[in-house]
Amino acid sequence: MNFRPFYILFIFLFPFNGLAQRVVKGIIVENDSTTAMPFVYIINKSNGNGTMSGADGKFSLVTSDNDTLICSYIGFAKLYMPVKDLQANNKGEVKLVMRAMPINLKTVTVSTFKIKPYEREYMNDIIDRSKIRKIEAFGSPITALYMKYSKEGKQINKLAKIFEDLMIEEQVQQKLSREILVKLTHDENIDYEAFRKYCYYVNNYYIITHEGFDLYSKVMECYRRYKSEMRR
């Protein structure tokens, strides 16, 4: 009697434990073991698949016992956790604790763009002169008309617009330069310009008017989608 077909069927019905897959469900928390952490990357080291913790810090990911989970979040040490070492509670959920690191984004050197003090003084002077037509529109109509229609007035207004854009860019670079983006994402090869175009809703105005978690969680949320589409 030939047992080979039954042997093959047995393998498919009862896979080896080392290859068995299971869904790991749990929550990411801070050092105090109670504060949930949203927007944490959880990556399966074996195949690169991953997910991100939700607003309540919870996540789920398909793994096998031989896999290792890598958890990453700005300001916290990367956590490497072998799946076989995970201990689930009575609900079948695991708890992963992230350890804060003394990382301060303000220490990142923004070498790409910085306006010098004497340049700023000159730029502010030009910007102030361009606003005369608005400030003195009622008090001095002649001056306002001159600034609006004269060759010199037009040149000043054009230059003022350039300087205003440069000052906005300086503020943006202080919060989200390429150096800061790399530190956030741990992606040394990221195309800064391509990412900024893709992440259009985190525009200059949003960057300037938001701080800390509100800003960087939105950036990381966009980065996750950006990388996902890059893999397609």
Image: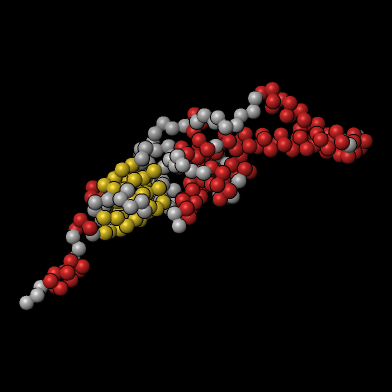
129 vs 28, left or right, is: right
Residue 191, how many percent across, how many down?
51, 44
Quadrant assignment, res 74:
top left
Spot the residue most to the left.
1
Q: Residue at x 38, y 52 (%)?
A: 50
Which quarter of the rendering shows the C terminus? bottom left
Quadrant hosting residue 11: bottom left
Residue at 50% in and 36% down:
180
Dividing the image into 4 quarters, which one contains the N terminus?
A: bottom left
Report the colour scheme. Answer: secondary structure
- Regarding residue 160, the answer to whether it shows in the image is yes
Pick the residue in front: 113 or 129.
113
In this view, the residue in front, 163 or 124, is: 163
Residue toward you, 10 or 26: 10
Q: Residue at x 39, y 34 (%)?
A: 101
Q: Is residue 173 above or below residue 12?
A: above
Residue 66 as seen in the image, left or right of residue 190: left
Looking at the image, is 203 positioned above or below residue 114? below
Q: Residue furthest right?
A: 142
Q: Position of residue 13 (x, y in %)?
A: 20, 69
Where is residue 17? Give x, y as percent.
Answer: 19, 58
Instruction: Determine whether 57 is above or below 1 in the image.
Output: above
Number of numbered markers: 0
Horizontal side of 9 relative to 161 (left or right) equals left
Q: Is residue 95 visible?
A: no
Residue furthest to the top in view is: 118
**Which residue is drawn at the image coordinates 60% and 31% (left, top)?**
113
